[in-house]
């Protein structure tokens, strides 16, 4: 009978340890998403810096930091359009870093899809510049830049498609 209790306690402890470690990893991402949902983008970026520097952060989370930083920057462009171009460039750089460092990561296809979306967003910015009365002297240059960005996004979407297959 005592052996049964001992085995039960050890089994329960083992299960609780496994469950708590899985939920701890999920908590990093849930907390980060909560910050983004509340439009606390700067705080989310600081949190990412903090967990990147923390040696106790699980490897799976460490690998996702460039991806999550890019997603935070990209979502920030929706609420702070005055910094849109610079923020899109930062987000694009983080996604490029992630896809270069972890080309076979399960999120690599999603990262490439997001890169394509960001490049299309940059193309839209160029299109808006081309339509701006203040930029009429540079209209053709902005239109050409937009076309190049759309072609670049098409290539990246193809890469993402290939990774999702």
Image: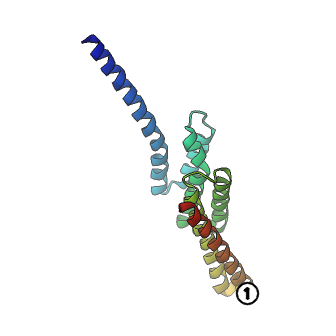
Residue 157 image point, x, y percent: 59, 69
In this rendering, the answer to whether 83 lies above or below 103 is: below
In this rendering, the answer to whether 105 lies above or below 127 is: above
Residue 68 image point, x, y percent: 56, 52
Q: Nearer the viewer, residue 76 or 102?
A: 102
Extreme residue toward the top, this view: 2
In this rendering, the answer to whether 139 lies above or below 39 is: below
Q: Quadrant of residue 92?
A: bottom right
Count of labels shown? 1
Residue at the spot 55% in from the left edge and 43% down from the top edge: 61
Q: Residues within 10 Å of mark 1 (few under 14, many from 20)?
A: few
Residue 52 image point, x, y percent: 61, 42
Q: Is residue 38 visible?
A: no
Q: Which residue is mark 1?
A: 140
Q: Is residue 59 visible?
A: yes
Q: Nearer the viewer, residue 105 or 125?
A: 105
Q: Give the colour scheme of this rendering.
A: rainbow
Q: Quadrant of residue 134?
A: bottom right
Residue at the spot 59% in from the left edge and 54% down from the top edge: 67
Q: Quadrant of the N terminus?
A: top left
Relative placement, left or right, of 22 versus 48 is left
Residue at the spot 71% in from the left edge and 81% down from the top edge: 142
Relative placement, left or right, of 28 versus 102 is left
Residue at the spot 64% in from the left edge and 50% down from the top edge: 102
* SS for callout 1: helix
Relative placement, left or right, of 79 versus 91 is left
């Amino acid at each position: 009978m005592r052996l049964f209790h001992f085995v039960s306690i050890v089994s329960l402890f083992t299960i609780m340890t496994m469950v708590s470690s899985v939920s701890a990893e999920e908590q990093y991402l849930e907390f980060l998403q909560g910050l983004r949902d509340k439009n606390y983008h700067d705080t989310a970026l600081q949190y990412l810096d903090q967990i990147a520097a923390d040696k106790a952060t699980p490897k799976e989370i460490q690998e996702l930091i460039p991806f999550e930083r890019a997603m935070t920057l990209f979502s920030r462009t929706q609420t702070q359009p005055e910094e849109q171009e610079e923020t899109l460039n930062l987000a694009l750089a983080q996604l490029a870093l992630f896809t270069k460092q972890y080309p076979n990561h399960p999120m690599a296809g999603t990262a490439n899809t997001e890169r394509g979306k960001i490049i299309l967003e940059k193309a839209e910015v160029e299109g808006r510049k081309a339509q701006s009365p203040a930029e009429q002297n540079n209209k053709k240059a902005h239109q050409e830049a937009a076309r190049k960005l759309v072609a670049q996004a098409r290539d990246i979407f193809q890469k993402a498609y290939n990774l999702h297959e």
